Each structure stands twice: as structure tokens, then as C-alpha cells.
Amino acid sequence: MRAIIVASGRPLGGEAWKSLVRTGDLIVGADGGAAQILAWGTAPHVVIGDMDSLPDQAQASLAASGCEFIVHPRAKDETDLELALSYVVERGFQEVVILGALGGRLDHTLANVLLLTLPRFAAAQIRIVDDHEEALLVRDGGAVTVDGRPGDTLSLLPLGGDAKGVTTGGLTWALEGDTLRFGSSRGVSNEMTGSTACIAVEKGCLLVVHKTGGYHEKEE
């Protein structure tokens, strides 16, 4: 099962969302992100948040269409995106794509990225996707494969401490059981040599940021 969560950060340009949303996906609006979904000409299945950034007209339109609202108080300990992630993961969604989580306020962008490190989300494969980049996390003993094109930029950034036993394939500057130190820029701006790159980590959390000339969902 796959869920699409749309936050209220920088929206995807044009009709890029059409290459990402599939038939059967659960579409979730994280508060103001629901307005962006309406702007695409479609509607979310559920809207989650305190509704402080969703215009009244949009709320009325969504309510009339039968959209479910899960309203939280404004005085809360989680962001709307964290609440939306909790909702989908608790319901067993194992693949989650987050849109609109980058750009705008720096604190929001950093908080959105750091949500990927929360242990309660470890069972799900979560990607943050923008027009020209995507971000995902590799945890202890895990590995990921990134699809792209030769020359795509790929950066590896440790989060929360050193990432140890980092091994890569399909990158210009290869790593073989190396340690990437937390706070170091060593892993920034590597390059893909082919259509796929593989990254494995023995211990720690490693953020993988894949930058392209434009996002293209891999065909099934």
C-alpha cells in the first residue's frame, strides 16, 4: 500500500504530480497541503492538521466532496506533517511519498527531513520528493537503490551521528565500508555513473539526496 502526503511547502511545478500519483494511492493533505491538491484539480481522501493554513473556501469544497477531516488542536506537540505520517504508518502503509515538504521556511524544511529518522517510522519506506530532487533515509544494516541517470548528483549526509560501514555502487567516488562523520561535507555532490546507484550502511542513519534535471517516476 502506498500513501501520498502533500505538505504546504514549495509545490511541484506544472503537472509533475501526475507522474507521482498512482491509481489506488491514499492521498493525504497535511493541513494547507490540501489546497495544493485542489489546485491540481483533484482532492485528498483525508486532511490532517489544525486547519490554520487551509482557507475556509477550500475546507468547504473538500467537505462537500466527502473528504475526511482529522482536526487537531493548534496547541500540539507535532507538526501537521508528522501527524499525517503517523496516520499512514499506523495504518500499515509501507511506502510513503511526501510532496511539498521542502522550500519556504528553513526550520520547517529541516524538521520535515529529520522526521525520517524517527524510530516509529522505520518500518515504512519514506521519500521526500521535489521537482528536481528526492531524499530518503538508510538506517542500520539497510540498503537502497536509487534510479536516475549518469551524471545525476547524489549526496550522502549522516544524521544524528556518524554513519559507519558505508558502501556504494554506481557512483564516481566509491565507498567501501567507510565512515562518514556527522557534520562533515565529505559525502556531498557525488555523481551517478549509470542508471542506478546502491548505498548500504552498517550502522547509523544516512540521508541520501538525489538531485536530477527533473523528477521522473520509474515505470512499473
Image (spheres, helix red, strand yellow):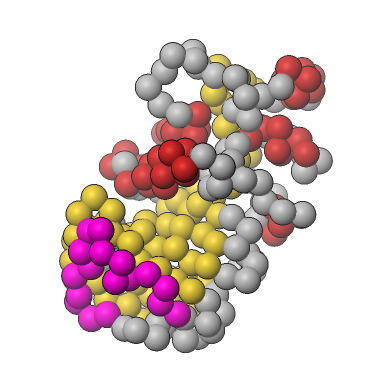
Look at the image and tell me in which quarter the C terminus lies. Answer: bottom right
On screen, residue 73 versus residue 65, left or right, reads: left
Q: Quadrant of residue 29?
A: top right
Helix, strand or loop: magenta stretch: loop
Residue 3 image point, x, y percent = 56, 44
Q: Is residue 43 left or right of residue 205?
A: right
Query: Is 154 positioned to the left or the right of 20 in the image?
Result: left
Residue 5 appears in view: no
- In the rendered image, residue 186 lying in the magenta stretch gets the answer yes
Q: Residue at x 54, y 19 (%)?
A: 50
Instruction: In this rendered view, identify the residue nearer to me: 52 or 61.
Output: 52
Query: Is residue 203 in the magenta section?
Result: no
Q: Percent position (x, y) of residue 118?
A: 31, 41
Does residue 38 sit above or below 195 in this rendering?
A: above
Q: Which residue is at 67% across, 32% downward?
A: 34
Q: How many marks?
A: 0
The magenta stretch is 175-191
Where residue 180 appears, x then y in whole percent? 23, 67
Q: Position of residue 57 (x, y in %)?
A: 78, 20
Q: Residue, x 56% and y 80% (percent of image)? A: 149
Q: Quadrant of residue 156?
A: bottom left
Q: Quadrant of residue 205?
A: bottom left
On the picture, is 106 further left or further right than 24? left
Compared to residue 38, the image places residue 191 above or below, namely: below
**Of residues 195 and 186, which is closer to you in this image?**
186
**117 in relation to 30, above or below:** below
Residue pictured at 44% horizontal, 63% vertical? 209
Task: Answer above or below: position of 146 versus 30.
Answer: below
Could you tell me if residue 103 is visible in this image? yes
